[in-house]
Image (cartoon, helix red, strand yellow):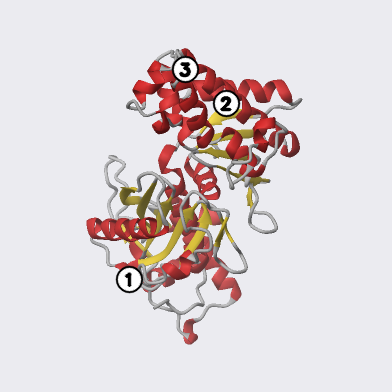
Amino acid sequence: MRTRVPLTPADSPSLLRQMNLAVVLREIRRSGPISRPAIARETGLSNPTVTHVVQLLLEKGYVAETDGPDSGAPRRPGPRAKYLVFRSDLGYLLGIDSGADNTIAMLADLSGTILVRARVEHGRHPDRERVLAAIRATTAQVLQEAGIAASRVEIVVIGTPGVSDPAAGHLLLAPQIEGWEGVDLAEELHDLVGCPVVVENEANLSLLAERWQGGAKDEDHVVYVQFGYGIGGALLLGGELYRGAAAAAGEFAYLSTGHPEEEDPERSSAGRFEWFAGGGAYQRLGAAAAMAPDGAVLLERAGGDPNAISARVVFEAAAMGDPAALRIADELLTRAGRGIANIAAVLNPGLILIGGGISAAGDLVLDTIARVVTDLIPFPPRVELSRLGAAGTALGAVRRAMQLANDRLYDFTEEPHH
């Protein structure tokens, strides 16, 4: 990391010592504050080895000593035992969600503790320049509020709609933001804070967040489906994020369910299933229903403009018991359930997680989709709503940044980054 003292050739560790350094540091991160004898017990290393390794970690600035937790028991005579803690302030991580609706930035320390966050709304139909400006604005805001210099950020991970081409680096399949397809975000933002910028699909990051702090903590086979204006998804198979040959796994917008409406000549360029069951479908069906005799509630919730109807408006009206809104919700959630059932029949996951804006509608969404999936396949998984809400992608970006920073943190032979 940039802030630590590098190992010099004279004290460059052998392979065994590197392994011991990594083992001890991981244990301190996991269990600290922790004493040297406790490290030895937990790692199986000898007391002399732990003492030597801890001393090296102290000298190089990876860990610090503390008096440790106060148990409240009377102190014994003699020197008080020292405990070790990981120095999570060695550097900082920036996780950013650059979605179609808003940009959210989270600044975290190396332990993943979120220090400050910022959010900028994009408004409807954002373009490339607006989103890039929002990324820069939220980055500047979190650094200023935390009082952290940009030079202390170790890595930035940005979550975005679409697929980041693993060969060329530019974005594909991202129609939600005008001018976004073809953008090389890492290159566009190379000067953001002066450290590596990594671009990831937003649904993949949301699933990482669910695996870290949400509903997928104890699951190894998970399908995450994100319903916003668009439809995306991510797969956890055998405990690992599955990306696919072209890093395009989880592009559920392109499912086909054989419904005649999928063949509409004006369907979304993002895919048939997205046209059929995504945010645009709520707008189309809602606008038509608002002009019908029983559409007064929908029209009122949209401020008198049928073109302003969205999934949020439909679910708000449905929560009020409006029959027109309930019909639309039932129709589109049934469509969603059929698509999800197709995915589950192939992958046999233990858990389906529903995220994105649609998850805010609660039991109406959960019950309808779960019923459809259960009715259609022989081994239905549990169906649950995301517990992380709108914060999921940015939180997943922080988690991915932690993983990437850890790769360098445990490489005790590298020179510091400048």
Residue 47 in view: no
User: Mark 2: which secondary structure?
Assistant: helix
Mark 2: few, some, or many residues within 10 Å (few <14, many ≥20)? many
Residue 202: give x, y in percent of width and height. Answer: 51, 50
Alpha carbon distance from label 1 to label 2: 47 Å
Going by the image, does 376 lie left or right of 417?
right
Q: In the rendered structure, find residue 151 and report the number of the disc placed on it.
A: 1
Q: Nearer the viewer, residue 274 or 212?
A: 274
Amino acid type, mark 1: Ser
Q: Secondary structure at mark 3?
A: loop
Viewer-nearest of labels 2 and 3?
A: 3
How would you rate the neighbour count of disc 3 (Cα within 10 Å): few for under 14, some for 14-19, many for 20 or more?
Answer: few
The disc, 1 or 3, on the residue closer to the chain's N-terminal end is: 1
Residue 335 falls left or right of residue 114: right
Identity, as a three-letter code, of the amino acid under mark 2: Leu
Q: Determine which of the numbered discs, if any, sits on residue 292 in the image.
A: 3
User: Residue 217: image x %, image y %?
Assistant: 54, 40
Q: Which amino acid, by three-letter code, is at mark 3? A: Ala
Q: Position of residue 390 (x, y in %)?
A: 41, 40
Instruction: Look at the numbered discs 1 and 2 and tell me whether their residues touch, using CB distance below 8 Å.
Output: no
Percent position of residue 412, x then y:
50, 73
Q: Earlier in the sequence, mark 2 or mark 3?
A: 3
Q: Are marks 2 and 3 in contact (CB under 8 Å)?
A: no
Q: Residue at x 41, y 27 (%)?
A: 313
Residue 333, numbered label: 2
Query: In the rendering, which numbered label is found on residue 188?
Result: none
Q: CA distance from mark 1 to mark 3?
A: 58 Å
Residue at 43 percent across and 58 percent down: it is: 36
